[in-house]
Image (cartoon, rainbow, N blue to C red):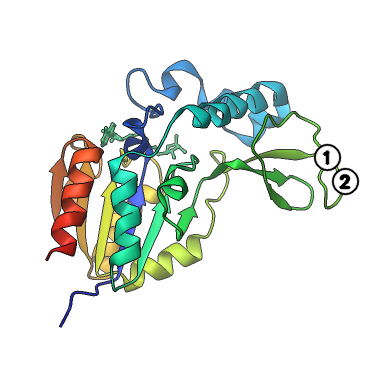
Amino acid sequence: MPDSRAIVILTGAGISAESGLETFRASDGLWASYRVEDVCTPAALARDPVLVHDFYDMRRGALAGVVPNPAHDALARLERTWPGDVLLVTQNVDDLHERAGSQNVLHMHGELKSALCAACDHRLRWQESLPPGAVCPACTAPLLRPDIVFFGEIPYQMDRIERALSRADLFVSIGTSGAVYPAAGFVRLAHAYGAETLELNLEPSAGSGWFDECRHGPASIVVPAWVEALLSG
Ligand code: APR
């Protein structure tokens, strides 16, 4: 019987680190230079929209200077060739999974290249700078904002994620510190539903103890090695 297990993959900033994008909690990470309370909460957006829009413009602009790394490529190859279901859930708001060729990507924290209307929830692809007061093409309210899930807001498509975890045979967490819920709790949910759990990360994370197996090293090494072993199983 060929292996066609259902796989749910969760990625975090660590998978994009080797493409040159900053992580959050490294000593030189984004949260060492910016305060969450200033750029990643609804109150911050209301208090200082220019600062918040500039922060995400800076991060959106940085995408032009980076490319997917072998870890992104390996996950795209897995999606193309694995006979079972593969759902790629990412906490990342960059577009590197898509640029590597992954198609079934669920951005639970939103996307830099999307704008959201705070009045009517209309979403549209957005490539350039997004100034405060940009007009929504659907309802004409001047309330387009970065389509990013701020702290205190509800991550996207949680029902779909929980359904996939309930059916998963294998849950793999890649490049995340396990510091932020609900993503940090996925391993326990997957385990409770009987899935095998694997962590691929540079170093032990806050959640390592919940995984059946942990393989530590740079994502561009450990992720292709894992995919190759799975496909040549
Ligand atoms: N290869 C593999 N893993 C790496 C690499 C690498 N080259 N570099 C760093 N890592 C790992 C770190 O060991 C760490 O466990 O990636 C993880 C990055 O952790 P964080 O900076 O906390 O990023 P992340 O886990 O994605 O943060 C989760 O927090 O601030 C919010 O919304 C934000 O989505 C983000 C969420």
Which residue occupies 38% across, 29% down?
A: 23
Up-down relation of residue 98 to residue 85 (above or below): above
Describe residue 123's horizontal placement relative to residue 22 as left or right: right
Say which residue label 2 marks.
140
Say which residue label 1 marks.
135
Residue 72 at x, y percent in the picture: 34, 46
Up-down relation of residue 128 to residue 188 (above or below): above
Report the front residue among 107 and 152: 107
Q: Is residue 198 visible?
A: yes
Which residue occupies 38% across, 27% down?
A: 20
Q: Earlier in the sequence, mark 2 or mark 1?
A: 1
User: Neighbour class for label 2 at 10 Å: few (<14), some, many (≥20)?
Assistant: few
Residue 140 at x, y percent in the picture: 88, 46
| SS category of the residue bearing label 1 | loop
Ligand 1 placement by image quarter: top left
Residue 1: image quadrant is: bottom left
Residue 135 at x, y percent in the picture: 83, 40
In the rendered structure, are the residues bearing label 2 and label 1 in contact, judged by CB atoms less than 8 Å apart?
yes
Question: Label 1 is placed on what type of residue?
Answer: Val
Q: Is residue 211 visible?
A: no
Question: Label 2 is placed on what type of residue?
Answer: Thr
